[in-house]
Amino acid sequence: MFHELKSKSIINKDVFFCLNPISTSSEKSYTENLLDMNIKLHRTFTNSHIYLMQLFFKFFLFMPILVFFNNHSVFYFLSTRDIKLINAKLHQQKSMFMHKFTKQVYFIAYQEPIRLVQLINNLFPHVRLSPIEYQLHRIENTYFEIYVYVEENRIKFCLGKEGRYIQSVNELLSTLLDKRIKIYLRVLAF
């Protein structure tokens, strides 16, 4: 993914990107090459991952695509259809399932192939009502910071209690994408 970009030598400046951008063609092509690139997440299967997948299957009778967990959170990656099914018809199973954990449980929409910008949007489903804006900043050849700009009244949902959600998202991205991307939140100024 990143070797492709180095060979094209297009990574040389900061770029501002919005979901509905009004920008020059050079800015748009730069962001499309990095943020709109298809990515594949690295899957790991330890005993804990298999246990979490079996526990999910026990409650919902279908398997998640991918599971990620850390000290604060458990992320289940599901198809959009499965998330709609859980939210619409399986409320009782969902509440019983979430009470099994001391950690926060999140259901994230995921389908392969997925673009990086889609993955970021799926990781912040509670700010979908307003457009999310991005600023991409290159630190080194293999490390990128993405600044996600959200409205002031929605930033608390993106941070989570004591900043745990954004920590979990960054840990998830660093694990699943080879520690090359980190997300920072900024308040959107009007």
Image: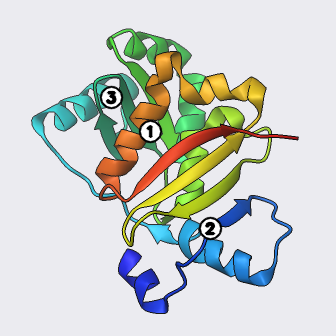
Q: Is residue 188 left or right of residue 50?
A: right
- Which residue is identified by label 1? 169
Quadrant that contains the N terminus? bottom left
* Camera-nearest label, 3 or 1: 1
Picture layout, residue 90 above or below residue 113: above
Instruction: Check residue 56 in the rendering and tell me which mark sits there, or answer none.
Output: 3
- Which residue is identified by label 2? 14
Q: Amino acid under label 1? A: Val
Q: From the top left corner, tell me how far across and down residue 104 is, in percent.
A: 42, 19
Residue 21: quarter of image? bottom right
Q: Amino acid under label 2? A: Asp
Picture layout, residue 90 above or below residue 27: above
Residue 95 appears in the picture as rendered: yes
Residue 1 appears in the picture as rendered: no
Q: CA distance from mark 1 to mark 2?
A: 23 Å
- Label 2 sits on a secondary structure element that is loop
